[in-house]
Amino acid sequence: MAAVTSASPFARASPKMIDAAAAAASGRPLKLLTLLLVVQGDRVLLGMKKRGFGMGKYNGYGGKVEAGETVLEGALRELHEEAGIKATDATPRGRMLFEFRGEETVMDVRVFSASAFEGEPTESEEMTTEWFGVDKLPFDRMWADDRHWFPILLDGGFFRGYFEFEKDKIVDGVLERTADADTALKAFGASK
Ligand SMILES: Nc1[nH]c(=O)nc2c1ncn2[C@H]1C[C@H](O)[C@@H](COP(=O)(O)OP(=O)(O)OP(=O)(O)O)O1
């Protein structure tokens, strides 16, 4: 399992590097977003984004956390709105900061996974619903960071990272497997 993760050029991050990357973003506005991956046995539910940010890419389900809801509630609501299902065992797995060159706001993405749900995956106006085998994930049609942290997610682990993008290409990044979800969350001084 370590071999999978260390294959990533970003996996050599020390906590110090992560903190330095986070400090680079401190003081900048963070946009709180969720991302929920439904992983059932050896298959993963992904949706192709049909509009807006990330259009044309496959991803898990998620979006902005609304006022008055917790991050988990936001993650569950987005999954339901976009894929028509209710996850019953969603659990936090990681935290990723994404910076886009030329943009002030840094995306603060809270990653969850779930394996159980109620309902049938149903395509929405925003996303399709498609199952992919864990060894056939469409990484070349996903966000470039995904191939680096998916192995940790599929392996049952927790992670935190920071990636800088120029359009949709990675220009810099650090990624670290953490001992638990709390460590991943508190990494960048999460307030909620
Ligand atoms: N580099 C990245 N890698 C990744 O795997 N997911 C990313 C990502 N950058 C953003 N995301 C996810 C987080 C979130 O689930 C989604 C963006 O949220 P939204 O779809 O809500 O954005 P939109 O600007 O389209 O919002 P709405 O206009 O409210 O639909 O993309």
Image (cartoon, rainbow, N blue to C red):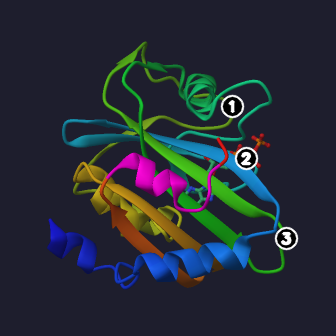
Which residue is at a point 76% across and 80% down the rendered structure image? 101
Compared to residue 101, the image places residue 81 above or below, namely above
Q: Name the residue under label 1.
A: 125
* Residue type, label 3: Glu
Tag 3, which secondary structure? loop
Compared to residue 83, the image places residue 10 above or below, namely below
Q: How many marks?
A: 3
Q: x and y percent of residue 134 in the render?
A: 25, 51
Q: x and y percent of residue 55 in the render?
A: 67, 54
Q: Can residue 166 be seen in this view?
A: no
- The verdict on residue 108 being magenta is no
Mark pair 3, 1: CA separation? 29 Å
Q: In this view, does 56 lie to the left or right of 133?
A: right
Q: Is residue 148 left or right of residue 40?
A: right
Q: Do the residues labelled 2 and 1 touch (CB within 8 Å)?
A: yes
Which residue is at a point 60% across and 40% down the rendered structure image? 62
Q: x and y percent of residue 79 in the render?
A: 55, 29
Q: Mark 3 points at which residue?
A: 104
Q: How crowded is mark 3: few (under 14 residues within 10 Å), some or many (20 or more)?
A: few
Segment tinted magenta in the rendering: 180-190
Which residue is at a point 63% across and 24% down the rendered structure image? 81
Q: Residues within 10 Å of mark 2 (few under 14, many from 20)?
A: few
Tag 1, which secondary structure? loop
Q: Name the residue under label 2.
A: 51
